[in-house]
Image (cartoon, rainbow, N blue to C red):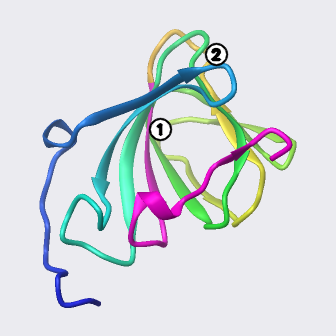
Amino acid sequence: MSEHSRAVITTAEERPLEEWNDPSRGRISWHTLFSSDRTPTDSMTAGVAEIAPGSGALQPHRHEQPEIYFILEGTGILTVDGRETVVTPGTAVFIPGNAEHGIRNDSNENVKLFYVFPTGSFEDVVYRFGKD
C-alpha cells in the first residue's frame, strides 16, 4: 500500500453520478466509490452501476484488467465472450482480463451491480468497444 492509503467509508450518494448514453458505449450510470484519483485509496477500484429498464445496457467491450460484478438488484443478460447468461440478485461474476463482455437490461426494473477492478484508479481502465 502507498503512504496515502487509509480506511475510507463512503456511500454512493456521496459520490458523483457519471453516465454514458450513446449507442457505441451504451446507456448506463454509475457512482465510482473508490479510485485513487478521487479517494485516498490504492490497489482497487470499485463502484455501483445502474442500468435502466428497456434499452439500458453496457455494450460489449474489453479492458486489460479482470473485473468482478455482483448483482444487487434486477435481472440482466450478461454476455462474456459470446455466451449469454441471465444474472439475478446474488449472482457473482469474475470476468477475465481482455474478455469481451457486456450487460443489458431487458426487464421492467433497474439492474444494479457492484463492480471491482484490481487497479488503483478507474482512469487506468481503458474501455475498448466493438472492433477496437
Name the mark on residue 89.
1
- Residue 1 falls left or right of residue 96: left
Of 4 and 87, nearer the camera is 4
86 inside magenta stretch: no
90 in relation to 17, above or below: below
Hey, what amino acid is under mark 1? Pro
On the image, the x and y values in percent for residue 123 come to 45, 58
Judged by depth in the image, the label closer to the viewer, 1 or 2, is 2
Residue type marked 2: Asp
At 70% across and 65% down in the image, what residue appears?
A: 96
Q: What stretch is highlighted in magenta?
A: 111-132
In which quarter of the view is residue 65 placed? bottom right
- Mark 2 element type: loop
Q: Which residue is drawn at 57% across and 60% down?
A: 67
61 w.r.t. 92: above or below: above
Residue on which disc 2 sits:
106
